[in-house]
Amino acid sequence: MMLPPPDVEALSLPGRLKATSASVAEALRQGTTGAAWDARMFVRPFGFDHTSIRVPFRALHGALDRSVPVALVKAYIAEIPGAALRIWPNDGHVSAPCNHIAEIADALKDSSSDWGDFHPSQNLS
């Protein structure tokens, strides 16, 4: 799978590829079980009913993500009552967190952030 141009650009910044490689190496240092569990999500249910989530739920996603298609994210979010989705139209799987880390950190610090609600009828491409 080829990366979309924004991901290639994000990894081309000085030190970014080295940092990403170090992060992957650390994630796999104690074995591949965690990575296997991540991959498992592509082919099996989560193990819980995501439609039963009743706490504030926010998702952040790059529209150009080729690892986790935005259509899949929209479908899941639409099934979670009150969930909100922020889509960055010009970002992929790697570039979204690289380009929006401050916004992500702020959202984690301030759960009252006004992200707006995603509705399946909206065109958020």
Image: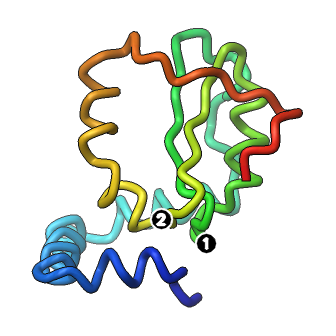
In this picture, residue 60 sits left or right of residue 122: left
Q: Please name the residue shown 14% across and 74% down the image.
A: 19
Residue tagged 2: 93
Residue type at the position of mark 1:
Arg
Compare residues 95 and 2 and report the one nearer the observer: 95
| Sequence order check, earlier mark of 2 and 1 | 1
Q: Please name the residue shown 59% across and 56% down the image.
A: 89
Circle 1 Cα neighbour tier, 10 Å, few/some/many (<14 / 14–19 / ≥20)? some
Q: Is residue 42 above or below residue 51?
A: below
Q: Please name the residue shown 45% across and 75% down the image.
A: 6
Q: Label 2's element?
A: loop
Q: Residue furthest right?
A: 121
Residue 109, image x, y percentages? 24, 21
In this picture, residue 97 sits left or right of residue 53: left
Q: Label 1's element?
A: loop
Compare residues 91 and 60 and report the one nearer the observer: 91
Residue 11, image x, y percentages? 29, 80
Residue tagged 1: 66
